């Protein structure tokens, strides 16, 4: 898939919460717009670059060509001796107000598993159960945001960027792509932005000919997960995609799959191994 389609997919992303605090964290809303699509000419990303790094590049490019913010520094590696103790994502200055903002950028895919807890916020997990919303929030609050005020960061920002850390507001730009079990509707969810819901998830036993046999499918590379399925020109039958799915699941990897119905409708979903 082209970089252009990935960039467009990024511009259609949504932040997990907005206009309020969640977990005691203030949301940074860059107000993404596809009007900025022409900025793709300014982005150079190697073919092997992983999705997370691509998101950082798209985010930086969008801000650099907006009229709202100046990037004072980005992707600042902080060291204690020769050991990396963390990275500060973005230090921004709002042009209109002069406000300085430390922004931590997050881009995640979560599945809602209501079997985990009665507390909805404890039910959001990564497709392979190696990630968890609350685990990431804990890392942000206890490590990533406090990093700005460590002696090492204060020294580096002063000596290399001529920046003082005093006066920076700290915010989190938390993009999320959310997937629900078929038994749960988005109206049942609390706290999160419903615009983040991208599709559904099922287990292999539910992926039957009776329910899914008439559709066409594509398993995209992870770098293409943010792309809208409608842009895909290459589709496979249920039978052909089934063997590919088995390979993923045997390796305990949940694939993201694009679906095209006979009526020309498109969906995204995960099949999980657990």
Image (tube, rainbow, N blue to C red):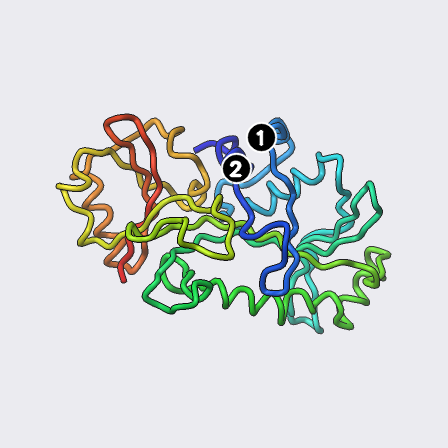
Q: Is residue 235 left or right of residue 132?
A: left
Rendering coords of residue 72 (x, y %): 78, 49
Rendering coords of residue 161 (x, y %): 82, 55
The front one of 183 and 168 is: 183
Q: Circles 2 and 1: CB distance less than 8 Å? A: yes
Residue found at the very far front of the displayed protein: 187
Up the image or down, 85 lies above or below 77; here it is: below
Rendering coords of residue 112 (x, y %): 38, 57
Q: What residue sits 59% from the left and 60% below the top?
A: 22
What secondary structure is found at the residue carrying circle 2? loop
Which label belongs to residue 42?
Answer: none
What secondary structure is found at the residue carrying circle 1? helix
Q: What residue sits 51% from the left and 46% below the top?
A: 49
Residue assigned mark 1:
34
Up the image or down, 57 lies above or below 90; here it is: above
Q: Earlier in the sequence, mark 2 or mark 1?
A: 2
- Counting every numbered tag in the picture gives 2
Rendering coords of residue 38 (x, y %): 62, 26
Q: What residue sits 70% from the left and 51% below the top?
A: 74
Residue assigned mark 2:
12
């Amino acid at each position: 898939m082209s970089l252009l389609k990935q960039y467009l997919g990024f511009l259609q992303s949504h932040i997990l919460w907005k206009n309020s605090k969640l977990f005691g964290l203030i949301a940074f809303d860059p107000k993404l717009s596809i009007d900025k699509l022409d900025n793709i000419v300014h982005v150079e990303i190697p073919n092997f670059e992983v999705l997370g790094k691509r998101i950082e590049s798209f985010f930086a490019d969008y801000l650099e060509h907006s009229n709202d913010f100046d990037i004072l520094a980005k992707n600042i590696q902080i060291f204690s001796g020769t050991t990396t103790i963390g990275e500060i994502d973005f230090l921004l200055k709002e042009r209109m107000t002069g406000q300085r903002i430390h922004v931590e950028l997050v881009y995640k895919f979560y599945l809602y598993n209501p079997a985990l807890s009665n507390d909805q916020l404890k039910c959001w997990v990564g497709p392979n159960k190696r990630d968890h919303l609350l685990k990431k929030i804990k890392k942000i609050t206890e490590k990533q945001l406090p990093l700005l005020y460590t002696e090492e960061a204060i020294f580096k920002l002063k000596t290399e960027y001529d920046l003082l850390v005093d006066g920076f507001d700290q915010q989190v730009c938390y993009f999320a792509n959310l997937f629900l079990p078929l038994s749960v509707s988005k109206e049942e969810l609390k706290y999160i932005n419903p615009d983040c819901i991208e599709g559904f998830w099922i287990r292999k036993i539910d992926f039957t000919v009776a329910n899914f046999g008439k559709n066409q499918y594509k398993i995209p590379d992870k770098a293409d997960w943010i792309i809208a399925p409608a842009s895909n020109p290459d589709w496979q039958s249920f039978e052909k995609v089934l063997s590919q799915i088995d390979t993923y699941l045997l390796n305990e990897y949940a694939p993201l799959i694009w679906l095209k119905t006979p009526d020309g409708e498109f969906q995204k979903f995960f099949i999980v191994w657990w």
